[in-house]
Image (tube, rainbow, N blue to C red):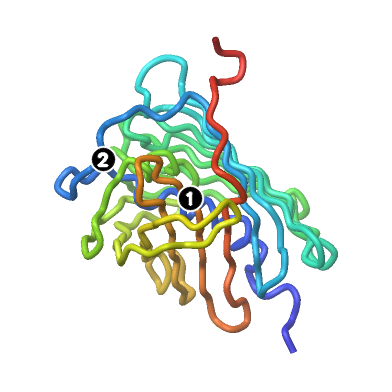
Amino acid sequence: MLKWPPKHFAHLLALLLAIAIVLPAFPQPAFNAAPPLAPPPHETFDYSIEWRLINAGKAHLEWNASPTGSPEAGDVRLHVESAGIVSRLYLVNDDYSASVGSGFCAQNSLIEAQEGGRHKETRITYDSAAHKASYLEKDFNKNTNVTQEVAIPGCVHDLIGGLIALRYLKLDPGKTAQIPVSDGKKFVMAKVESQRREPLKTSFGTVNTVLYEIYLFDNILFRRSGHLHVWITDDERRLPVQLQVRLQFTIGTITFRMEKPPTTEAAPGGK
């Protein structure tokens, strides 16, 4: 009988989208990078979350470009919440925010997590000049703090801020890239593999996609065994229409599906 909640399930549910959207963010000119178009000033994405063939929750993501400076700089916000039977058994209500600079390089991030009876806040500061990331986790229930530092290169990507950059990397099937990633506690060069082109059925029709596998599990960034896949539309919009993690039997497969094409508009308060 499956024990609820499986170990780390809520944390994986909350982090899956953030992990998947950031990884192919590092520019790779040798691999036929897409034209250097600027991201839109404001864009929103909505996903449904499925776990073991049931509705497990939803995720809402927003990108707001910086009003000054590089068009690759801005703020990302992500809200993840559980739904249905998952909420009744183990409520997840998490908010993520991150600021990125030129080249979508991480500057800082904040995670406010309420999962079941847990309530934690995690702040990560990425200091490119000092080449280090500083991690601070506050547990409000236990009234404890956990701090850690890790060495990083001058530009590294966090676990939330790279969705927009992902759409400007064009990695043809059969090609791979190495991506600098840090969660504030560990730094790795994660492998991204472009596997094949395939049509994918979505709620807004069948779209042509490129399937990527991101290697973060199996003692790379995370200890547990697993596979992380991302489907990106094979067109000029480069939409991340589906994200999926397959883990061992006790957790199974978690899938994020885009509910509709993203909303693109002027930034709030802009002209």
Q: What residue is rendered at 18% in x and 46% in y?
A: 32
Question: Mark 1 or mark 2: which is in front?
Answer: 2
Residue 49 lies in what quarter of the image? Answer: bottom right
| Category of crowding for the residue at label 1, using alpha-carbon neighbours closer than 10 angstroms: few (below 14), some (14–19), many (at least 20) | few
Element marked by disc 1 = strand
User: 78 above or below 58?
Assistant: above
Q: Are marks 1 and 2 in contact (CB under 8 Å)?
A: no
The residue at the far bottom in this view is 1
Question: How many marks overall?
Answer: 2
97 left or right, relative to 236: right
| Category of crowding for the residue at label 2, using alpha-carbon neighbours closer than 10 angstroms: few (below 14), some (14–19), many (at least 20) | some
Q: Earlier in the sequence, mark 1 or mark 2?
A: 2
Measuring from the top left, give residue 185's x and y in whole percent. Answer: 45, 54
Q: What residue is rendered at 32% in x and 40% in y?
A: 168
The residue at the far top in this view is 271
Circle 1: residue type: Gln
Measuring from the top left, give residue 2's x and y in whole percent. Answer: 72, 84
The residue at the far left in this view is 30
User: 207 above or below 34?
Assistant: below
34 left or right, relative to 101: left
The residue at the far right in this view is 88
Real-space CA distance between mark 1 and mark 2, rounded to the nearest whole angstrom? 37 Å
Foreground residue among 215 and 117? 215
Measuring from the top left, give residue 238's x and y in whole percent. Answer: 39, 45
What residue sits right under mark 2 in the picture?
34
Q: Quadrant of the N terminus?
A: bottom right
